Each structure stands twice: as structure tokens, then as C-alpha cells.
Image (spheres, helix red, strand yellow):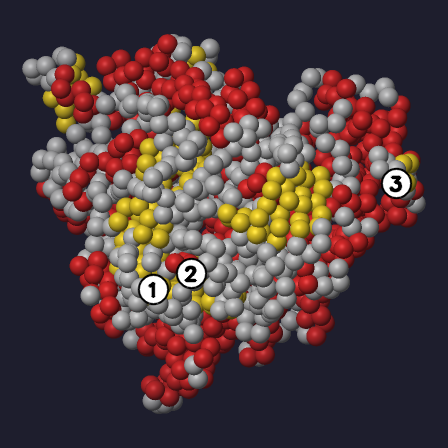
């Protein structure tokens, strides 16, 4: 058995790797990137030279490492071929802007520093067409942050590159160091760059040290965000989980022991009705009718605290919290009763029909004893194993309820991260929740084996 | 009710068991009605006449619409603009038209009657653009049911096949499929939906169905796998193997039918769940395209007008809740009827 | 089983038929419900630039707290690296700029932190004399060094403020002369220089750069990439600046933000609220040099900005007394949910205009919209008046061009295009869009008139617009597909020019420069002229007007520009939008101004007893 679990634990790692790779690819495949939000609505800007809007985006992308290739960076070996592609593209008379152009220039930009000597060499030879010169200069300008602007004549731009590369005196007479020396790379350095200059490996290395990086949106460590949001969501997920169990299990037992009676039917229908009510609808209704608008004023409708709650005493604080939590909590919970109680009912019915229960009845034990002592205990087994679901719940929230009630929990955090394309947060949330889910599954298997002696994992084939 | 009749088939037993459950039977009938609306929605609510006599000739505009949409036919010259109500002014003697019971299409707007409470002319009232709510709900039935059916069909297919393979073969196949299940469970579904919605050129409810289908199969797969593990060592499977039957045949002819019935129950619940998920997605703005009325989108756009526009939330809300409830009750009835141990 | 099914089916049919017996053509006009639903409408014309919506003439008193709602929370409070409006709205009370608007003439020339300033004769250099009596909230004196530090931080290429930096791209040098003289030089004599070079927040150097990392470099150094690339200190500063805890003072024990303004930062609880308290030691508090409506007011003890993302919840919170001021609500809420006698007695409703206009942008490079006649026709096919009346609840002010309707640049001599579908169809046919192949859809050169209207998923208004357009254009043989996209994809498609039609809002200022949006330089390469407007005359006007410092002459050029816009109809210009809001009637001194966000809380004060206002 221990061997079996060891194997299971070891299997978690490839699964996690798979999950992270797939997630990574999918979120990067999604169109849109965080720079869209970084730009804001810029009418008041003064973007007077052509390149600027583009430069702004490129700069922002670079600050967050979004300009690197996804998986492995092989562009550092292929830049000469890429240059040929660009050449063909330009020969065909294609424009120097637009998505197609960006796509074709991207690989050589990703090669970054490695391609610089090659590009400078090209410019020096001087046999480039005017368009090719422009492209080469643009790549150098953007990636190496040269102070070349479009206002400068082509000759001056070339001269600038010359000065920059070999050093020399600038207009103010100051001697500048040559850039040439800092662009020599050994084979080992190149090999390292395959991994270090790519997004996923960078992320993976950091993740192994449980370092999820900073949020793109506000530059704060992802951990801080999670630390802030998890307790908020836990209040809801955990309480609602317990509430659901406390209410649904007795209901399920009742339904099972009173199968086909009116009581059973009524609970069934009521639970299904609850399940069928879309929560955003109920939440809105509740806000309008119970939140103190034009109708009843029973519950506060937003956030978790009254303003100034910090100054209250412990009990008043708790009361305030409960007051705020009550309404969202009810809406959070009501839908989950039905599944749980149905499950309980089914498992109870199954047990009741087992031979040993019949035997117990035949022995003349009272119905109560049979039900609550023998049947209940055994039918609870599958329910108990579901407790393992608690683990991933720690990091999940509800997008809809949290956004309607302005609760800063995990649901809002991850939904906003998705909308904002805040990759570090998305990756962190998925990875952590994947880990917890996997451990949860494992734990539930363990629990199952622990409570049900019939199950062993030895004869696994 | 003990076994009296000598030759009752399995399905007869099931159906007689099912009929004992009044709630489930009523629910089944509600589903029939929904199916009727699903199929004949265009004849129940439309701004085009079903039959009309115009300048001495008889036309069937609703049927024609199918022709135009599906068969590449074209509208008659007189109807190019498809504005049949305006044509009424041009009627000659003897011209007439029979409209569907709700003579509004789901997209036809009339700002002058916006936000009207239920009245004789608009049974369920109108929305912020003055569109008829009932007509939108009738057309929304199609979307909501379709989402359920297609999504569930997809995930049943995937789930059963993968579950069967894993359960039957075990070993490395089982391990791989189990990892797939785990990956799928922990997958950020929200992001997948956004990605697909954004990547595809035309926004369509079909995308949502496919995503729900492709991400929802894990439960079915685990269940089928479990059933297969149980059945694998039973006599008839061992016998089939001993007889040298191909694996394929064993799986599909002998093992699968025995595991199928409980899966069907899951499917009914699945339809209900899919309808709810669609409404939630519509609320977040990732559901059907704007011109496509769905119950969820009606509900979410109505939030802004509360509490004045109560009819905007009440009726679609009722529609969702009735549909989801009846599917669940039918599923529940089926489960009870199919379970041999629950027979009394 | 069969029988019951039949009965149920018949019942359903009967129900529907019965319901339909009434008169179909019955149409109840609800015009009365529209109109001005009991609120004060603030329109700031040229004559009246500050509007007071509360009872004037009462004697202001200090004290009181105000809780206002904001729908979004800033990502952080670093003035330079933040791009959210929520952050700048909050920080505008804490940080100050060298110059500010004069609230009477609305020129950007009122000295604030600067005591005086002058422009060199050639127009390239601005010299600011910094006030000597300004102290930071922690007691340190504000000097020209802080100003220089602020501009250095913006120009540091590694600081995450690329959009802001682009405004300063023409700066060539800057420096100090003694403790209180700051000068800055631009390579252009651009007419908005004064607004840009005097309009950035001054941040305290001793907080953000305590080690003086940037002291070693001059502004010229920071503009020189061969230096910035080599010098580790520049990068080091940027990294710490981007992450500085001063930018996110979250929680109980956080270091407060140190500014120089009339309010002090108080607390920030993420997802809950941010607050600030009055600065009793404000440098400008007892000086008399700023007449009228300015920073010397500041009566409220405390302002709390509460985050409520859901519009329904925020109005409910107002009614329930949890908040005092909702600056923006939905138009439908303003018109249908805030009219009870109770509400009107307790709250003052107000709608005010800010310089932001909505438009429908036609991609001029698509075959359908390359002909200006088609664009004119599109404008005439959109019933803007009905849209305004029924969908926008009369909250729109129709505009003919991109300039602020109450500003001096707006050309009032141009008459709006009418709603005229008949003339529109004629124009479309003139342009050659006729149904050649008889499939009911117009076409030209084999291209069917079948375009996609992109709608951002959050915007109800443009969704309704698209739905109406789809239904209307279907009748004249044009197919509209609606595509709903979430914001980041929407913006990306916009930048890459992958769209046919968009519906959006431009947020501008009192005076704007059309260069970025309308010059053909900015087509492609993700420039803001994403609809591809090209017009040689317009280009030349836009280019030359930038360097015309004489306002009259410049505006005359812009008047001509608007005539071109009107004729070309690159956009269908829709409305300047009024923002509807409501506040508790206990507040007085409530003033509205024509710049974003439309109000400044300096003059607001809270009457502690309601009796007072009754008198």
C-alpha cells in the first residue's frame, strides 16, 4: 500500500508539469495582452513620432518579459535565417507596419543581444536596401534602447550606431565606451540563453522555489495578493461547505428513510428548485429587496466591513462581519444542498438494502438503531471522502457572488487577472489549485482506504 | 407488484417504475412542451406571417425564411426588406395574413414601447429596446436546450470512451487517462472559454457548447472507469475473453450496455447544469452573441432595470428554474427506475 | 400519457392566443418618464464655468466625513506608474502640480507649487520659481530638487510609465538653479507644452529616492541610452521605484503617502476603501493669493472612497445610508430608480458634463466605408435623437466633432447631419452599392455589404446601438454582424486595425490636440488613428496648428478642421455624455467643473444639522 501511494505522489509531479505547460500555452494563446490596460486611454499623449505608440508597448512588454519566446528560445541560433525571411517579406513589397510585419520581425527581436553583432555587421556592409536598413535600425533601437529617433536622417542614425558600437566621442566631447565588447557570448552562455531567455522555463524555475513573481497589473508580489484574498474566500467557502454538510446530510437521511413519502418528495422538489435558481439573479433580487433600497433594510450590500470597523471591539467586529457575510453566504450555499443531499440519499438507500442491514432488522433491532447506528455509519463513508474537496476550496472563490457583493476574494482576483491578462496571477492560482486538487484526490483515496477495510491497493494490476 | 407478467422486457419494467413517480412524469411532459417550443419556435413567435395572401398570390414567409437560411433560396422581390408589417399598408382587397400567436421576432425593436409591463399586446412585457420578452424567451428556449444537449452529448462521448479504455485495459493506459482527467479537473475553464470566444471569428453559442463538452467529461469518465473495473472480473466478461472475442467487441457489445444506464442519468442532470452554466456565462458577458436572446442574457441585462422592470427578471428566471427543475426531476425519476436495488 | 400531453399543449396555445387578443398596435408613449427626472442639470457653458448645485450663500463650516463610491480600485498609488483613473482621481488631492487650471478662464496658467513661471523668448524653455513656503506632509520642505527628481523618474527608461513618458519625449534638458528655480527645455514650441511641463505630480525625493541614486545623472544622461544601458544605478532606482511600498500603503501600519496637497493620505484597505484626512498644515490654507474656488478650501475632515463594483449595489448603498455620494450611476437608475419622494427629500440628483464623447468609428480602409458618401449615409441612418431619448435617457449632448462642446475649440456653426434614411439610401446607391445579384444584400465589385460591428462586452450602450443598427440596416439590404469582445482583445484588434466598425468613447480635455487621433502619421504601427483617416488638408492643419501659439489663430484652423471632419464623417460623432450622480443634501458648497472628473471636493462641506439648511 505504501508503495502505491508513493507511486501516486510521484505521479503528481508530471501531472503538475503537464497542467502548467498546457495552461501556459493556452493563456498565452488568448489574444490581448496586459499592455492594453497599461496604455489606458491616451488621448492627451503627445506621441509625435511614428514609432512611439509601438515603443511604448514594446517597452512595457519588455519590462515584464513578455517579449521572450514561450517555451525555449532557439531564435538565438536562427536569426540569420529570420533575416532572410524578413528580406523576402520586404522584397515582396509588404508594408513596414501591421501585424504581419510584427510577426515576421519578432524572432529576430527575441534573439535580442545575440543578433546584435550580426545586425551591426549588416549595417556596416552597406549593401542593404533602404527598407532593410530601416528595419535593422528599428530592431536595434527598440531592443538596445538607442536614442535614435525618426527625425534623424538615415546617415546620422548609422553614424550613431557606429559610435555606439565602437565607442568614440559624442557631440559634447565625452568619450563613450564601445558597446562591442558587451555583445560577445560563449557557447555556454548561448546554451543557457535557450532556457533563461524564454518565458516558461523562467516561470518554472521561479515556481519551483515557490516564487510566483509580481503581478503585472500593480507590480505587487503574487503571494501578497493571494495572502490577501484567500482568507476572505475561506470565510465563504469553508463556512458554506460546513453549512451545506450540516443541512444537506440530515435532509438526505430523511429522504432515504422516508423514501416516496410526501416529505421526501417535498424536500426533493424544494432542493431542486433552490439548485435551479441562478445565483446572480437571486443576488440581485436580494440586494434590491433586502439591502435597504426602497424596500427592506436588513443586510449591507457591499464589502465585508462597515467603515470604521477597526475601532470596534472584538465582538462588535465579529458581529459586523457576520452581518456583512450573511447574505452572500446564503446565496453561496443554497445551490449546493441538492447535490449533496441527493448523494447522501443515494448512498443511504444503497446501504439500507444491504444484507447486513436486513440481518440487523431481522435480529429485531429497532429501526432507529438500524438507521443511525449501522446504516448511517456506512453510508457516510463516501461523504467523508468528499471532505478532501476542502483542499482546493481554500483557493477557489465565486466570481459572480464576489463581484456583485464587492468582496475582494479569490474569485474576483482570478477573474480580474484573466481579464487583465495578468499572467503571473493566473499561473499561480492555477498551479496552486492544481496542487491542492491533486493532493485532495490522493487524500480522498487514502481516506477511503482508511475507513473501508475492503479496499486495498495491493493487488493493483 | 411482484413479477407476475411473464415476459416483460427491461424497458417495460423501467417505464412502469418510472410512471409510479408522479413528479417525474409531470416533468417529462413539461420537457415535451419545451421540445415543442424548441422545434416550432419560429411558428410561435415571428414578425413574419405564417400564411399570407398578397396581390392575388399566397405566400408562406416563415417557411421561406427556412429556405433562405438553410437552402440558399431568396426572398421574393416584394419581400426583399422583410418588413411584412409595413406591407399591410399596401394591401389590396382580399389580401390577408395570418401571423404567429406572438407577432414579434426576438430582434424586432420599438423604442416607443420600451420597458412596458405585461399587457395584452406584450404578454410578458418589453425590454429596454422595446423588444417583446416572450418572443425572446421562445427563441431563447432553443439556445438553452441546445446548450444542454450538445454539451452533454460531447462529454458523454468523450467520457465514456476514455473511461471505458481506462477501466478495461488498466495499466499504462489507465495511468495516462487518469492524468488526463486530473489535468482537466484542475484546468482554468474560464480562460479556455475566453480564449475560444476571442479566437473564433464569429461569436456563437456553439463555442460555449463545445467548451462545456470538452471540459465536462471527467465525471463521466471516472464513473465509467469505476463501472468497468467492477464489471471486468465478472463471469460474462471473463467468458467473452476466453472465447477469444476482440477487445473492441467485448467493450462495446458486452460491458458498455451495462454501464450505460447510470450514465444516462448523469446526462439528464448534465443538461440542467449546462443550462445554468450558460446563464452564468451570459451574466459575465461570455455567453451567446448579443443578437441571440438566451434566458441568461435576458436575466443579466434585466439586472440594471430592477426593481422597476420586474417582468424582465421574473419570466426568464422562471423559465430557467422550471427547465432545470424538470430535467433534474426526470433524472431523479430515471435513476430510481433504473436502479434494480431500489425496486420495492 | 398521450392525452395529458395534448391537453397541456392545447392549454399553452390557448394561453398564448388569449394573451394576443389585444390590439397589437397599441403603443404607449412614455415620454413623460424621460426628460429631466428631478435632478439638477449642469451644463457648463463659456460664461459660467463653475456651477454650484447646492444652496449658495451659506457659511461653510469645517468638519464632517464624506463617503463616496468608486466602481474600481486603483492597482496602486504610484502616481507615475499607475494608469488607472481611480488612482489619479485620488492622488490629485494629495500631490500637487507646478501649475493648474485657472477656474475662471480655464487656461492652464494658475501657479500652484510654482510661485511664478516664464517662457523663454524662443518658446523652448520654461522656468518655474518654486514657492518657498511649501512643506511635505512629513514636514520637509519642497524644493526644486523634488521637481527635478520627479521629471527624472518619469524619464528613466526603466520606470514602468511608458505611456506618460511619451508625453515628455520632446524634453531635451532640465535642471535647477538654486533651491527654488526649476527650468525645463523642450525641442518643440508645442502649444500644450505649458500644460504638460507644468502638469505632472511632484513627488518627494527624500521618500522615493532616499539614497539619491538619480542625483548622479542629469536629465540629458537619462535621455542617452548608452548611459542608461550601462549604469546599474538607473536600473536599480527604477526597480525600487516600480515596487516602492509608498505606492501601495495597504493596511493598518502602512507608511502613508507623503504629498504636499490639502489632504493627507489616511488608510487603504484593499477591496474595501481608501481614505484621506484634511491637512491642517496645508501651505496654502491661510494665504489669500488664490481667489475663488481653489485648494484653500478643504472643509471636510475626512473623505472615504469606498469600492463598490456593482452599480445596483452602489445605489442601494446610497439609499441605505452607507455612502453619501455616488458620482456616477446608470442612466436608467437616474431616471427610474431615484424618484421616490423619500429619495428626493434626502438626496440631490445632479447630472454634469465632462469632456468625453462617444462615437462610432468606421474603418475607412474597408471597402464598405472607403467612400465618404457611405459614411455620410451611415450617419444619416442612425437615429441619434431616438437613441439619446430612449436608450441614453437624454443624457447625451449631440456633437459634430472631436472637440469639447463647451470649449473654445468647438465649431458651433456646423449643422449636424439629420436622420434621413431615404437620402442615406440614395447616397449608398450613388456610391455603387446596389443589389446586383438579387440576393437581398447590396454589393459592389462582388463584395457584399456585410460588416462586423465590434462591441466591448462591458458596454450596454454600444450593444444596444449595434442591435438597433443591425435591425435597421437589414431593411435596406445591409448585413451587420455583432461581435462582442472583452476589453483587452477589443483594444488589440483596434491597434491592429482588425475591425470594421467600433463604438467607443474618447476621454479628452478642455483643449485637445487632434494630432494623435487624426493625423495620417498615426495610422498603423498601433497609432490611435486606427480607423485610417487620411486627408491632406486635415494633415496639414493638424501639423501646423500644433506650433501656433496664438489661440485665436489656432482655433480658426481647428474650425476648418471640423468642417473637414463633418464632410468626411470618419466617425459618426455621437454625444458628449452627462454623468448622472446623487449626493446627500447635507452637503453644501457642491460645485461642478468642466474637467474630469467633474467635481473637486475642496469646496464641499457638510452641514452637521439639517435645521441649518431648512433655514
Cα distance in 3D space between marks 1 and 2: 9 Å
Q: Are marks 1 and 3 in contact (CB under 8 Å)?
A: no
The residue sitting at 38% across, 68% down in the picture is C62
The residue sitting at 54% across, 74% down in the picture is C252
Q: Are marks 2 and 3 in contact (CB under 8 Å)?
A: no
Give me the disc on residue C297.
Answer: 2
Residue B152 position in % (x across, y down): 44, 49
Mark sitting earlier along the chain (1/2): 1
In the orientation shown, which residue stands out farthest toward the front? C288
Quadrant of image for the C terminus of chain C? bottom left
- The chain ID associated with circle 3 is A
The residue sitting at 59% across, 64% down in the picture is C135
Q: Nearer the viewer, residue C521 or B332?
A: C521
**Is residue C545 in view from this perspective?**
yes
Q: Nearer the viewer, mark 2 or mark 3?
A: 2
Q: Which residue is mark 1?
A: C60
Name the side, left or right, on which B89 lies relative to A460. Answer: left
**Is residue A302 in view from this perspective?**
no
Where residue B24 sits, quadrant-wise, is bottom left
Work out whether A341 lies above or below A207: below
Q: Which residue is mark 3?
A: A174
Work out whether A394 lies above or below A66: below
- The chain ID associated with circle 2 is C
Residue B208 position in % (x across, y down): 45, 44
Q: Secondary structure at mark 2?
A: loop
Amino acid at each position: 500500500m505504501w508503495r502505491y501511494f508513493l507511486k501516486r505522489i510521484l505521479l503528481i509531479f508530471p501531472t503538475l508539469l503537464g497542467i502548467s505547460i498546457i495552461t501556459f500555452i493556452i493563456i498565452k494563446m488568448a489574444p490581448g495582452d496586459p499592455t492594453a490596460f497599461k496604455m489606458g486611454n491616451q488621448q492627451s499623449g503627445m506621441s509625435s513620432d511614428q514609432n512611439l505608440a509601438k515603443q511604448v508597448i514594446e517597452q512595457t512588454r519588455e519590462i515584464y518579459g513578455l517579449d521572450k519566446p514561450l517555451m525555449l528560445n532557439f531564435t538565438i541560433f536562427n536569426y540569420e535565417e529570420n533575416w532572410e525571411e524578413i528580406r523576402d517579406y520586404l522584397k515582396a513589397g509588404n508594408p513596414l507596419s501591421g501585424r504581419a510585419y510584427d510577426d515576421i520581425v519578432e524572432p529576430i527581436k527575441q534573439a535580442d543581444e545575440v543578433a546584435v553583432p550580426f545586425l551591426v555587421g549588416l549595417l556596416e556592409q552597406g549593401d542593404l536596401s533602404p527598407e532593410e536598413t530601416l528595419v535593422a535600425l528599428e530592431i536595434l533601437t527598440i531592443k538596445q534602447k538607442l536614442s535614435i529617433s525618426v527625425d534623424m536622417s538615415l546617415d546620422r542614425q548609422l553614424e550613431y550606431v557606429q559610435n555606439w558600437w565602437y565607442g568614440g566621442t559624442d557631440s559634447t566631447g565625452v568619450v563613450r565606451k564601445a558597446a562591442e565588447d558587451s555583445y560577445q557570448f560563449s557557447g555556454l552562455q548561448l546554451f543557457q540563453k535557450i532556457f533563461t531567455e524564454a518565458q516558461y522555463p523562467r516561470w518554472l524555475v521561479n515556481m519551483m522555489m515557490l516564487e510566483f513573481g509580481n503581478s503585472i497589473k500593480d507590480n505587487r508580489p503574487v503571494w501578497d495578493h493571494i495572502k490577501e484574498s484567500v482568507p476572505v474566500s475561506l470565510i465563504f467557502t469553508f463556512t458554506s461547505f460546513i453549512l451545506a454538510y450540516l443541512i444537506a446530510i440530515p435532509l438526505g437521511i430523511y429522504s432515504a428513510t422516508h423514501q416516496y413519502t410526501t416529505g421526501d418528495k417535498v424536500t426533493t422538489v424544494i432542493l431542486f428548485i433552490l439548485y435551479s435558481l441562478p445565483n446572480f439573479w437571486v443576488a440581485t433580487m436580494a440586494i434590491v429587496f433586502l439591502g435597504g433600497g426602497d424596500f427592506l433594510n436588513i443586510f449591507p450590500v457591499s464589502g465585508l466591513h462597515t467603515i470604521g470597523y477597526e475601532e470596534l471591539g472584538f465582538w462588535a467586529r465579529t458581529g459586523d462581519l457576520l452581518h456583512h457575510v450573511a447574505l452572500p453566504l446564503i446565496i453561496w450555499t443554497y445551490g449546493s444542498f441538492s447535490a449533496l443531499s441527493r448523494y447522501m440519499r443515494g448512498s443511504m438507500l444503497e446501504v439500507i438494502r444491504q444484507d447486513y442491514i436486513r440481518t440487523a432488522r431481522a435480529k429485531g433491532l429497532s429501526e432507529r438503531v438500524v438507521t443511525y447506528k449501522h446504516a448511517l455509519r456506512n453510508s457516510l463513508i463516501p461523504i467523508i471522502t468528499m471532505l478532501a474537496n476542502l483542499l482546493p476550496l481554500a483557493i477557489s472563490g465565486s466570481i459572480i457572488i464576489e463581484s456583485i457583493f464587492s468582496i475582494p476574494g479569490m474569485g474576483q482576483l482570478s477573474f480580474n487577472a484573466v481579464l487583465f491578462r495578468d499572467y503571473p496571477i493566473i499561473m499561480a492560482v492555477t498551479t496552486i489549485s492544481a496542487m491542492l486538487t491533486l493532493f485532495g484526490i490522493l487524500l480522498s483515496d487514502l481516506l477511503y482506504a482508511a475507513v473501508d477495510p475492503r479496499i486495498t491497493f495491493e493487488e493493483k494490476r | 407488484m411482484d413479477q407476475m407478467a411473464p415476459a416483460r422486457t427491461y424497458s417495460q419494467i423501467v417505464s412502469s417504475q418510472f410512471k409510479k413517480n408522479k413528479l417525474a412524469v409531470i416533468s417529462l411532459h413539461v420537457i415535451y412542451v419545451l421540445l415543442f417550443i424548441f422545434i416550432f419556435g419560429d411558428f410561435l413567435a415571428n414578425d413574419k406571417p405564417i400564411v399570407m395572401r398578397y396581390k392575388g398570390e399566397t405566400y408562406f414567409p416563415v417557411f421561406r425564411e427556412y429556405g433562405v437560411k438553410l437552402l440558399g433560396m431568396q426572398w421574393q422581390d416584394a419581400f426583399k426588406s422583410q418588413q411584412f408589417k409595413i406591407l399591410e399598408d399596401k394591401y389590396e382587397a382580399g389580401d390577408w395574413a395570418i401571423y404567429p400567436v406572438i407577432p414579434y421576432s426576438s430582434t424586432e425593436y420599438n423604442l416607443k414601447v420600451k420597458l412596458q409591463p405585461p399587457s395584452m399586446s406584450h404578454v410578458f412585457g418589453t425590454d429596454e429596446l422595446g423588444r417583446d420578452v416572450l418572443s425572446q424567451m421562445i427563441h431563447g428556449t432553443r439556445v438553452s436546450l441546445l446548450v444542454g444537449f450538445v454539451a452533454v452529448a460531447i462529454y458523454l462521448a468523450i467520457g465514456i470512451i476514455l473511461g471505458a479504455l481506462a477501466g478495461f485495459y488498466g495499466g499504462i493506459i489507465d495511468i495516462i487517462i487518469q492524468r488526463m482527467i486530473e489535468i482537466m479537473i484542475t484546468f482554468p475553464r474560464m480562460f479556455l472559454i475566453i480564449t475560444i470566444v476571442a479566437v473564433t471569428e464569429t461569436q456563437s453559442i456553439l463555442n460555449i457548447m463545445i467548451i462545456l463538452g470538452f471540459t465536462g467529461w471527467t465525471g463521466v469518465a471516472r464513473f465509467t472507469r469505476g463501472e468497468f473495473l467492477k464489471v471486468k472480473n465478472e463471469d460474462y466478461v471473463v467468458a467473452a475473453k476466453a472465447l477469444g472475442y476482440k477487445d473492441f467487441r467485448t467493450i462495446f457489445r458486452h460491458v458498455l450496455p451495462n454501464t450505460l444506464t447510470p450514465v444516462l442519468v448523469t446526462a439528464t442532470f448534465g443538461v440542467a447544469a449546462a443550462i445554468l452554466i450558460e446563464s452564468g456565462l451570459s451574466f459575465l458577458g461570455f455567453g451567446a452573441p448579443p443578437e441571440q436572446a438566451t434566458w441568461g442574457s435576458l436575466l443579466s441585462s434585466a439586472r440594471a432595470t430592477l426593481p422597476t422592470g420586474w417582468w424582465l427578471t421574473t419570466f426568464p428566471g422562471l423559465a430557467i428554474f422550471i427547465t432545470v427543475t424538470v430535467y433534474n426531476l426526470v433524472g431523479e425519476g430515471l435513476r430510481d427506475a433504473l436502479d434494480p436495488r431500489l425496486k420495492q | 400519457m398521450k392525452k395529458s400531453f395534448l391537453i397541456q399543449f392545447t392549454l399553452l396555445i390557448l394561453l398564448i392566443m388569449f394573451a394576443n387578443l389585444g390590439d397589437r398596435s397599441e403603443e404607449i408613449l412614455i415620454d413623460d418618464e424621460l426628460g429631466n427626472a428631478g435632478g439638477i442639470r449642469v451644463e457648463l457653458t463659456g460664461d459660467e464655468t463653475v456651477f454650484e448645485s447646492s444652496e449658495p450663500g451659506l457659511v461653510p463650516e469645517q468638519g464632517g466625513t464624506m463617503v463616496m463610491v468608486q466602481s474600481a480600485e486603483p492597482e496602486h498609488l504610484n502616481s507615475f506608474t499607475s494608469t488607472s483613473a481611480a488612482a489619479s482621481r485620488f492622488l490629485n488631492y494629495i500631490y500637487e502640480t507646478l501649475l493648474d487650471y485657472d477656474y475662471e478662464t480655464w487656461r492652464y496658467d494658475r501657479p500652484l507649487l510654482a510661485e511664478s513661471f516664464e517662457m523663454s523668448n524662443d518658446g523652448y524653455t520654461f522656468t518655474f520659481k518654486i514657492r518657498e513656503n511649501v512643506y511635505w506632509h512629513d514636514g520637509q520642505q519642497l524644493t526644486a530638487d523634488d521637481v527635478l527628481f520627479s521629471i527624472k523618474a518619469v524619464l528613466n527608461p526603466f520606470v514602468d510609465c511608458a505611456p506618460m513618458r511619451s508625453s515628455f519625449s520632446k524634453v531635451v534638458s532640465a535642471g535647477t538653479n538654486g533651491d527654488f528655480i526649476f527650468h525645463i527645455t523642450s525641442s518643440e514650441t508645442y502649444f500644450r507644452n505649458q500644460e504638460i511641463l507644468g502638469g505632472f505630480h511632484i513627488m518627494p525625493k527624500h521618500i522615493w529616492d532616499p539614497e539619491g541614486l538619480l542625483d548622479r545623472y542629469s536629465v540629458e544622461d537619462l535621455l542617452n541610452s548608452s548611459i542608461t544601458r550601462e549604469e546599474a544605478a538607473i536600473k536599480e532606482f527604477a526597480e525600487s521605484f516600480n515596487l516602492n511600498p509608498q505606492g501601495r500603503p495597504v493596511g493598518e501600519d502602512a507608511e502613508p503617502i507623503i504629498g504636499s496637497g490639502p489632504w493627507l493620505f489616511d488608510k487603504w484597505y484593499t477591496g474595501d476603501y481608501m481614505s484621506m484626512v484634511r491637512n491642517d498644515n496645508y501651505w496654502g490654507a491661510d494665504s489669500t493669493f488664490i481667489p475663488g474656488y481653489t485648494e484653500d478650501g478643504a472643509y471636510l475632515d475626512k473623505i472615504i472612497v469606498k469600492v463598490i463594483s456593482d452599480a445596483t449595489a452602489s445605489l442601494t448603498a446610497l439609499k441605505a445610508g452607507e455612502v453619501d455620494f455616488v458620482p456616477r450611476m446608470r442612466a436608467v437608475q437616474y431616471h427610474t430608480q431615484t424618484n421616490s419622494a423619500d429619495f428626493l427629500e434626502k438626496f440631490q440628483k445632479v447630472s454634469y458634463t465632462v469632456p468625453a464623447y462617444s462615437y462610432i468609428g468606421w474603418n475607412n480602409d474597408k471597402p464598405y466605408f472607403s467612400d465618404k458618401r457611405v459614411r455620410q449615409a451611415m450617419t444619416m441612418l442612425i437615429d441619434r435623437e431616438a437613441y439619446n431619448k430612449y436608450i441614453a435617457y437624454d443624457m447625451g449632448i449631440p456633437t459634430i466633432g472631436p472637440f469639447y462642446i463647451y470649449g473654445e475649440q468647438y465649431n458651433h456653426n456646423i449643422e449636424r447631419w439629420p436622420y434621413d434614411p431615404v437620402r442615406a439610401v440614395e447616397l449608398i446607391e450613388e456610391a455603387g452599392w446596389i443589389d446586383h445579384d438579387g440576393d437581398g444584400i447590396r454589393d459592389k465589385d462582388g463584395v457584399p455589404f456585410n460588416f462586423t460591428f465590434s462591441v466591448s462586452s462591458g458596454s450596454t450602450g454600444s450593444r444596444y446601438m449595434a442591435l438597433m443598427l443591425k435591425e435597421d440596416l437589414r431593411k435596406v439590404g445591409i448585413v451587420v454582424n455583432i461581435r462582442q469582445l472583452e476589453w483587452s482583445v477589443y483594444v488589440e484588434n483596434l491597434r491592429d486595425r482588425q475591425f470594421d466598425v467600433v463604438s467607443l468613447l474618447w476621454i479628452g480635455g478642455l483643449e485637445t490636440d487632434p494630432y494623435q487621433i487624426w493625423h495620417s502619421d498615426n495610422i498603423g504601427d498601433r497609432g490611435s488613428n486606427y480607423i485610417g483617416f487620411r486627408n491632406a488638408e486635415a494633415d496639414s492643419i493638424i501639423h501646423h496648428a500644433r506650433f501656433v501659439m496664438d489661440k485665436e489663430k489656432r482655433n480658426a484652423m481647428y474650425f476648418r478642421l471640423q468642417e473637414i471632419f463633418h464632410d468626411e464623417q470618419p466617425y459618426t460623432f455621437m454625444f458628449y455624455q452627462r454623468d448622472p450622480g446623487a449626493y446627500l443634501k447635507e452637503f453644501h458648497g457642491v460645485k461642478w467643473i468642466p474637467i474630469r472628473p467633474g467635481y473637486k471636493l475642496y469646496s464641499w462641506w457638510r452641514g452637521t444639522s439639517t435645521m441649518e439648511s431648512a433655514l
